[in-house]
Image: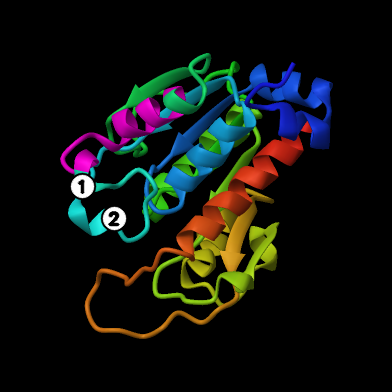
Amino acid sequence: MQNKFSRTEMLIGKEAIKKLQNSKVAIFGIGGVGSYVVEALARVGIGKFILVDKDIVDETNINRQIIATKKTIGISKVEVAKTRILEINPNAKVETYQEFFMPESKDIIDNTVNYIVDAVDTVTAKIELVIRANKANIPIISSMGTGNKLDATKFEVTDIYKTSVCPLAKVMRKELKNRGIKKLKVVYSKEEPIKQQGRTPGSISFVPSVAGLILAGEVIKDIIK
C-alpha cells in the first residue's frame, strides 16, 4: 500500500525508514539554513524533533526561509516549523523552545537525541553546542557561513580543521582548538564572501537552502548507515 514515504522506502529500504521514524533530531536555529533542514527531515519521516529558536518570522525572512510567508509574519519560528512538520507528518512528535541557545541555557538535549544540527549564527552558541554534544556523545553537524554568497555549488562537507576561506570557520577552528575539540563535521562554502557595507549579511533564496538540504542529507545518511 502506497504512503507518503513509499518513494523514499524504494530508495533506502524499509529498515532505514524505521530507523528514521525512531530517531530524534534537535535543530538549533530555524532560519534560512535550519528551516530547510527541518523541511527535509520531516519529509523523510524523522519521528521526533526538538526545535530551538527565539525569533518570530519577519518580512525580511521571506527571501530565504521556507517557513516565512505573509501568513506567518509575526509568529514564532519554532511554532510555524512545528505546524509545518505536522502538516507533512501528523505522526511526528515535536518539542519547541522559543529561546536563544547560549552557554547559560538549560540542557535541552539528553540521551534520547540521536543527532544535533547547529544552524545558529553566533560563535558562542555554536561552540557551546559542540561542547555539550561531545560531552553527551551525540553526533553533531554544524553550518558555517552562508551570507554574502551566490554560488551554491561551492558547499562541501568536511571536518572543521580542513576548512578554508570561510571567516566563520576560521574563528571556529581557533575556538575549538583552544577547547581541545579534535573534530567537527561541518558544511561550509569555499566561495569568498561578497564584500558589502553594513553588518547584516546579504542573502538569497538558493544558497542557505542548499546548505540546509546538505546538512539534512548528512544527518539522514548517518542515521541509516
In the image, residue 196 above or below residue 53: below
Task: Give the label, 2 or 1, closer to the camera.
Answer: 1
CA separation, marks 2 and 1? Answer: 8 Å
Label placed on residue 60? none
Structural crowding at the residue carrying mark 1, measured as other residues with C-alpha within 10 Å and reported as few (<14), some (14–19) or many (≥20):
few
Q: Is residue 179 visible?
A: no
Kind of residue indicated by mark 1: Lys
Going by the image, does 73 lie left or right of 144? left
Q: Residue at x 37, y 33 (%)?
A: 81
Along the line of sight, which residue is nearer the eye, 84 or 35?
A: 84
Residue 130 position by quadrant: top right
Quadrant of image for the N terminus:
top right
Kind of residue indicated by mark 2: Ile
* Residue 93 percent across, percent down from the top left: 48, 16
* Residue 45 percent across, percent down from the top left: 62, 26
- Judging from the image, what secondary structure is the residue with disc 2 in? loop
Going by the image, does 101 lie left or right of 111? left
In the image, residue 85 above or below residue 39: above
Mark 1 and mark 2 in contact (Cβ < 8 Å)? yes
Along the line of sight, which residue is nearer the eye, 177 or 222?
A: 222
Quadrant of image for the C terminus:
top right
Structural crowding at the residue carrying mark 2, measured as other residues with C-alpha within 10 Å and reported as few (<14), some (14–19) or many (≥20):
some
Based on the picture, tell me whether residue 79 belongs to the magenta stretch.
yes
Residue wearing tag 2: 62
Label placed on residue 70? 1
- Judging from the image, what secondary structure is the residue with disc 1 in? helix
Q: Which residues are magenta?
A: 71-86
